[in-house]
Image (cartoon, rainbow, N blue to C red):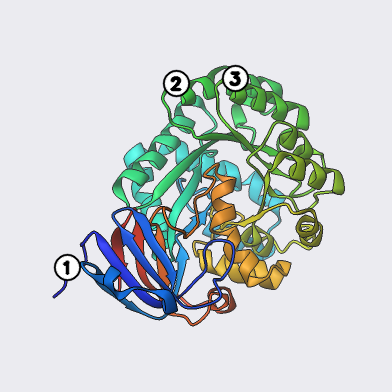
Amino acid sequence: MSNTNTKRRLWRDIHVFDGLRTLPEPMAVITEGARVATLVAMREFDEGLAKGCHDMGRGGVMTPGLVDCHTHLVFGGSRADEFEARLEGVSYEEIARRGGGILSTVTATREASEDELLELARPRLEALIADGVTTVEIKSGYGLTVEDELKMLRVARRLGEVLPVRVVTTLLGAHALPPEFKDDSDGYIDLICQEMIPAAAKEGLADAVDVFCEKIAFSVAQCERVFEAAEAHGLPIKAHAEQLSNLGGTAMAARHGALSADHIEYLDEAGIAAMRKAGSVAVILPGAFHTLRETQQPPIAALREAGVPMAVATDANPGSSPLFMPTLMLNLACTLFRLTPQEALAGMTAHGATALGLNGEGRIREGAAADLCVWNIDTPAALAYAVQPGRLRQRLFQGELTHAV
């Protein structure tokens, strides 16, 4: 039996989506160690290059490893009971009065130990990995104290140590107003700026800082204070913005050079222009749109016309998007928002990487990281066309084979 851990691996006669487009003819691909060494049209392939390579097979589709650039995977508790209650006619207000909603997740997350949170989050991340993810962003945001937000970030870091996946962490202290500050939102912003961000930066726990800029969360001015504090500590920024209304948070974030603005259902022309100027990525989250049964769609045509790159992510979380299947998001991005399959797949590879500040990642080209997926499908479009688990044939992370069927 061949050794599948050999450093050189060869695929022949395979269709390749390179992160931005489908290459026009079948290709030969060789990886050497953690990098793509050869990418050449099959008709031009020199069989002499096959010497010393492990034969990984023929046919199928190769894509970059998927990049899920917006998740909330670390949390305690479950809100399945609330899901059931809403469908039985209980109002959001009544659920909140019962201690439900995001604050129920906050309570459960605070009560859980770091080890308990790790064990709860691990199967969620394993589900993403099994569906082709090699890079994932994980936000905090359910602790809402300095200690508990740092606890969540430590768990996210540990997940990247125990599983074969690259984890990018984001501090989302400005996610909701904790009960201790229910009448003092500015005081909570002070805590984020003066204590939470400095502590996360000192421990090297956060790769970026996020905010929820919305009427039910934090104002544009408050979010700008958070961004200024992040910038003072050398941390890039991003924003949940224009999900429920148009406050101008996206434009403000773009002025601060935001990596991304996420949700953006109510984004206007000024916001789009600001994103284009800043090079910010528009992160589309069809899972939350689907779960919440929203009707206001993001301005896909205007973003496309302006040349703003669009990423697609699961937004996996316990409330508005309890969905842990990235390829389902490809389908929903196409069916709900009318992205093309190629746009959706680029959104979960090259553009997803850009949304995390990993410029140049999420691509297949010579010299690129060997974070790769091979799928049992005939064309890349089939990955978005069907919602069908079990199509992943092989997964490589940093050149190592982590999945094979």
Which amino acid, mark 1?
Answer: Asn
Asked if 219 appears above or below 326 in the picture, the reply is above
Q: Nearer the viewer, mark 1 or mark 3?
A: 1
Under tag 2, what secondary structure? helix
Query: Which quarter of the rendered picture does the N terminus lie within?
Result: bottom left
Q: At which x and y percent is residue 358? A: 52, 44
Reading the image, the residue beneath label 1 is 3
Reading the image, the residue beneath label 3 is 232
Q: Earlier in the sequence, mark 3 or mark 2?
A: 2
Asked if 24 appears above or below 134 in the picture, the reply is below
Residue 178 visible here? yes
Which amino acid, mark 3?
Answer: Ala
Residues packed near mark 3 inside 10 Å, few (<14), some (14 to 19) or many (20 plus): few
Q: At which x and y percent is residue 225? A: 69, 23
Q: Earlier in the sequence, mark 1 or mark 3?
A: 1
Left or right side of 370 for 52:
left
> CA–CA distance between discs 1 and 2?
43 Å
* Residue that protrudes farthest toward the left in the picture: 1
Reading the image, the residue beneath label 2 is 202
Which amino acid, mark 2?
Answer: Lys
The one nearer the camera, 143 or 72, is 72
